[in-house]
Image: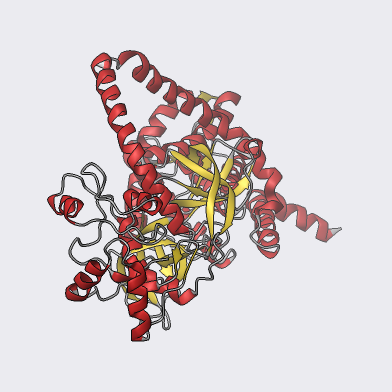
Amino acid sequence: MPITYTSGEQIEVYRFSIPVTVGVPLLALFLQAFVPRRFPFFSIFDLPLLVTIFFAMARRNPISGLLTGAAIGLTQDMLGTYPIGIYGIAKTVVGYFASSLGAKLDVENAGARLLVTLGFYLLHAAVYFTVARGMVNMTLNWSWVHGIVAGLANAVLGVGLYFVLDKFKQRT
Amino acid sequence: MLTTDVMESVLGRYRNLTILVGVLFLQVLGLAVQVKRSADAENTRLIRVWAVDAITPFERVVVWAQNGTRDLWHNYCFLRGVRAENRQLKQQIEQMRLDQVRLSEDAQQAHRLQQLLTFKEQVIAKTVPAQVIGSSGSDLSRSIYIDKGSNYGIKPDMAVITAGGIVGKVWIVYASTSLVLMINDQTSGVGAMIEKSRLQGVLKGTPDGAVILERVMSDEQVVPGDTVVSSGGDQIFPKGLPVGTVAKVGPGREMFLKIEVKPAADLNRLEEVLVVTEKQERNEVVDSGVRVRAADILAQRLPSVPEKPAIAAGAAAAKAPGAGDADAAERGTRGEATPMTTGGISAKPQGSRQSGTQSVAKIPDESSPASQAPKKAVPKPATRDPGLNGGSADAVGSNDGPAQTKPATTPPPVTQPNTPSPATDDPH
């Protein structure tokens, strides 16, 4: 289905079972922590971000989206060595805007999902960069090339991942 | 009343935005508190424990399954040719036993030479092997999880190494898991030095995961390929552990060089690591009571001009059995000082450096014609000093008895056959 601008009543709102709601983000965090040790190139992906975008856009509820993003982001922060909250803030913002976008647009086809994921990846990177440099005083270098390449890689993976996660959707 | 209504109206209308701002505010507040209190992870330890406890069981299960599959393959499915291999290994053991006898003699002598070094040095006394079970899950945080924690005696700031080189230090310790901050993380810092020139600097990570050596002045000579080792200055890594090699040298900030280092350990493909749980500070003492000066030790380590062959040959001739006293008398007449020797250890720097260094550095090759030659031609002087000269096992043995021709099977001394150093043949 193409991107269609529609009213809140026309678009479908999905929900997920509790095991999926809890298990999928945990699995994403686990894979993000485990797989790069075996395959270093995998660190370019941000599975928790893709899961955040998917849940936010499927539920189409900004509050639900931002809370999902905050929970996943904060958990991701807890696994690292930096202060807790950097990923939390970035994913909260992404979750909010993804669900806001999902409430207005029906994004179901692969091309639209690719573009949306690329955009949100860059937004996530920009927020992370700003918070990390502005508040935590981390030394980070912004690279458009790296950002776009990583964003495209995540978008491609995201399209496949969303296709799999679509199977768990339940109509309200 | 009107104000309250307006507020409720605004909050109701912008409910989502208000909640977003509220959640972001709380996170920014939490972040600010952590930054203000310093980067110490102890402030958020409990929260991190929850997250780690939620994630690491999955990782443990996967690693366990992976190892189980691998063991199954190696122990049951991959046993073809084991009998032939067993036979071959037995032969190798026999050969190695012979080698061991020879090497143990060399090791004993190396030990005696080591006693000359009065420098205090740290050695690794105890390590705990650990398996890497995961990473921090962030491309920007270079850290790994290992499957050993406080239950195994792991503590924060312990060094983590591999056979290749250093990996990082223990950052946060949980009961059965630990988080290791790797040397390529931008918040890490390791005392390191160039092995050849002994230039010291600070090894740091960069945001893109590279490793650089900082604080080396720009007028120093550093070239790509130089080996970098730990300096021990950080009190975490024992001195002398391999860190990596210099990959690129360029101008850095202010008056310092920017030296890019290729880590010796493959930080992207770590599977097993060793945690240094105990270090010993060894203070070598010369058991004979000889006071070796720092200049003498330095002279032993520095290269020097080799002795002239003619003088050496003359000295060798004078070193016939029983000629030691005559040699000493000759020195007395020339006004030379007799080298200080006590308890079988000569403190004469140059001669001892030549022979001692060579004997430790090289294991004599029996098949080499050059090394075979002196065995028959040069008799060994009876007064040869076991601690400093010769450097091989037979040299040690010669201390116990009169001069004797070396048997063909024993390793020859590494010193040149026709140019024996007079300094190494000093009588007691």
- Total marks drawn? 0
Specify whether residue A113 is in view.
yes
Which residue lies at the image location 58% right of the left edge and 44% below the top edge?
A: A62
The residue at the far right in this view is: B1
- Report x, y in % for residue B158: 58, 50
Up-down relation of residue B9 to residue B295 (above or below): above
Q: Quadrant of residue B4?
A: bottom right
* Viewer-nearest residue: B275 or B271: B275
Which residue lies at the image location 31% right of the left edge and 34% below the top edge?
A: B98
The residue at the far bottom in this view is: B335
* Viewer-nearest residue: B322 or A94: B322
- Report x, y in % for residue B96: 31, 33
* Viewer-nearest residue: A84 or B158: B158
Q: Quadrant of residue B305?
A: bottom left
Up-down relation of residue B184 to residue B202 (above or below): above
- Report x, y in % for residue B156: 63, 50
Which residue lies at the image location 71% right of the left edge and 62% below the top edge?
A: B37
- Report x, y in % for residue A104: 49, 43
The residue at the far left in this view is: B369
Quadrant for the N terminus of chain B, please.
bottom right
Which residue lies at the image location 34% right of the left edge and 18% below the top edge?
A: B73
* Viewer-nearest residue: B243 or B178: B243
